[in-house]
Amino acid sequence: MADYKYRRVLLKLSGEALMGSRRFGIDPEVPQRIAEALKPAYDDGVQIAVVIGGGNIYRGLEGAAEGMDRAQGDNMGMLATVINSLALQDCFEKNGFECRVMSAIEMHAISETYIRRRAIRHLEKGRITIFAAGTGNPYFTTDTCAALRACEIGADVLMKATKVDGIYDKDPVKHADATRYDVITYRDVLRKRLQVMDATATALCQENSMPILVFNMEQDGAIVRALRGEPIGTIVVEES
């Protein structure tokens, strides 16, 4: 563990990432790649928690845009995160990880109910802990859930895996002259309305001095390099 800067982390994954090359659902190759990326850190004793979205199955905001009640749509989205969490758990266990799924909505037959102290105990025992069903409340995104859980478990960093290698001043896909930040403050993220996490999640991290590391997990060895504190992606911190 001496080589690792971060020893307890929360990894935020998007549900869309699980689609891989598909247009919907889960590509089995993606959870396998995630497991392989996490394996070195897991074997070295890093405590890993995970929050995953449900956008590959259902997004409450899209349902609301089509006329569905927003709260009902968000409830459906939270259930989608449970499906993704169970898929990750199955893959992790097949790769030799001890893993628990803890849901903010009680589902005794398929998962444990989220209890902060029990979650911390799972992490201390070396179990990857997946937090499902968001916060259990509509109108809150899985980004906000990730920020909340990271603060609750006392994580050293909230790591957000994206398709790009950090935070840019504008969309690097659309703008060739986009500039990447190595370090940026919460204040600037909120002031410039950069698409890192939603404003509620960013503000929660700011209030609790929870660093946010945004990086591209698809790069070889990215997760281990990030955990070791190597300069990868963009880190969001307080003003120095």
Image: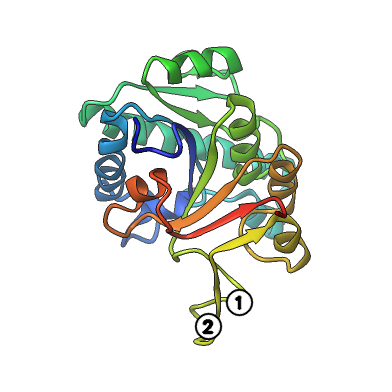
Q: Amino acid at mark 1?
A: Lys
Q: Position of residue 69 (x, y in %)?
A: 74, 46
Near-viewer residue (220 or 69)? 220
Q: Position of residue 233 (x, y in %)?
A: 47, 60
Q: From the viewer's perspective, is residue 110 above or below residue 51?
A: above
Name which residue lies at 35% across and 50% down.
225
Name which residue lies at 38% across and 38% down.
4
**Quarter of the rendering containing residue 219:** bottom left
Element type where label 2 sits in the image: loop
Name which residue lies at 72% across and 54% down.
239
134 sits to left or right of 91: right
Mark 1 sits on what residue?
170
Q: How many other residues sit within 10 Å of disc 1, few (<14), some (14-19) or many (≥20)?
A: some
Q: CA distance from mark 2 to mark 1?
A: 8 Å
Mark 2 sits on what residue?
174
**Quarter of the rendering containing residue 137:** top right
Q: Amino acid at mark 2?
A: Lys
224 sits to left or right of 85: left
The mark found on residue 113 in the picture is: none
Near-viewer residue (210 or 49)? 210
Element type where label 1 sits in the image: loop
58 sits to left or right of 210: left
Q: Quadrant of the C terminus?
A: bottom right
> Does the residue at mark 2 contact the one at mark 1 (Cβ under 8 Å)?
yes
From where the camera sits, is residue 28 visible? yes
Q: From the viewer's perspective, is residue 202 above or below residue 75?
A: below
Q: Quadrant of the N terminus?
A: top left
Q: Position of residue 24 (x, y in %)?
A: 40, 55
Judged by depth in the image, the label closer to the viewer, 2 or 1, is 1
